[in-house]
């Protein structure tokens, strides 16, 4: 790829978004960032790996549902006392910083973590949302996680999507999963993972 492009992929849990992102990155021979973001964020922020993983794309505790400060690294005033921002926000801002640094370096694929919102002013950004039929999602979740119970897979699917939506809706002024939020929305059930990745690349090639 001659022209720089940053491809952000938001996805329903079990839709194959991660695999699609990997195939797009391989097609263009560019960097792919998913869980790797957490490792980098932990190393650069000084937070331990377990803390970063714990708060990764998780819903925000009701105790912390107050407006973000214009300076995310400033102190918050609670009950008349200045306290450090909660760990959930420390993790978010650490990951945000990593995402911005990665985007500055060159073309890449970034999965989740509000990357589309964090990079919304980047002219090289192309945002994608991947969804799928519930039956396909449940089957993939059971297969990928060695879950034998369909009920358990459904519960995991619902909880993960709920957490991702709350996380995204809290840290951005957009809505997770709403078509107007993204440049392109695709259903992987329609074409399958491989052909969905190819279709996304075709669209990118046409507009870049």
Image (spheres, rainbow, N blue to C red):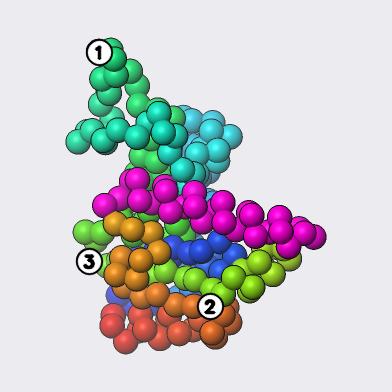
Q: Residue at x 44, y 34 (%)?
A: 61
The residue segment tinted magenta is 147-173
Q: Which residue is mark 1?
A: 80
Of helix, strand and loop, which one carries label 3?
Answer: loop
- 109 lies above or below 99: below
4 vs 41, left or right, is left
Residue 3 shows up from this direction: yes
Q: Position of residue 151 (x, y in %)?
A: 71, 59
The one of 118 and 137 positioned closer to us in this rendering: 137
Residue 163 in the magenta stretch? The answer is yes
Q: Which residue is mark 2?
A: 188
Using a 10 Å C-alpha cutoff, classify the residue at mark 2 as few (fewer than 14 neighbours), some (14 to 19) or many (20 or more).
many
**Residue 1, label in figure:** none
- 97 lies above or below 20: above
User: Which quadrant holds the C terminus?
Assistant: bottom left
Q: Earlier in the sequence, mark 3 or mark 1?
A: 1
Using a 10 Å C-alpha cutoff, classify the residue at mark 1 as few (fewer than 14 neighbours), some (14 to 19) or many (20 or more).
few
Residue with the most extreme top position: 81
Q: Position of residue 162 (x, y in %)?
A: 49, 52
Main SS of the magenta part reads helix
**Residue 123, label in figure:** 3
Of helix, strand and loop, which one carries label 1?
Answer: loop
The one of 135 and 195 positioned closer to us in this rendering: 135
Q: Across the whole image, how many numbered discs are drawn on residues? A: 3
Q: CA distance from mark 3 to mark 1?
A: 41 Å
């Amino acid at each position: 790829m001659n022209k720089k492009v940053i491809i952000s992929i938001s996805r329903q849990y079990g839709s194959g978004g991660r695999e699609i992102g990997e195939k797009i990155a391989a097609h263009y021979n560019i960097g792919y960032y998913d869980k790797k973001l957490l490792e980098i964020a932990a190393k650069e922020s000084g937070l331990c790996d377990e803390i970063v993983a714990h708060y990764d794309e998780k819903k925000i505790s009701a105790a912390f549902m107050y407006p973000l400060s214009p300076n995310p690294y400033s102190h918050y005033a609670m009950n008349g006392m200045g306290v450090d921002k909660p760990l959930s926000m420390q993790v978010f801002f650490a990951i945000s910083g990593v995402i911005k640094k990665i985007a500055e370096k060159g073309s890449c694929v970034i999965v989740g973590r509000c990357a589309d919102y964090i990079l919304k002013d980047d002219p090289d950004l192309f945002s994608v949302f991947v969804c799928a039929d519930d039956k396909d999602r449940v089957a993939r979740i059971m297969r990928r996680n060695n879950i034998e119970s369909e009920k358990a897979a459904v519960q995991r699917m619902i909880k993960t999507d709920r957490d991702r939506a709350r996380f995204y809706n809290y840290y951005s002024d957009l809505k997770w999963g709403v078509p107007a939020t993204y440049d392109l929305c695709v259903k992987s059930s329609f074409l399958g993972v491989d052909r969905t990745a190819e279709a996304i690349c075709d669209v990118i090639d046409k507009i870049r």
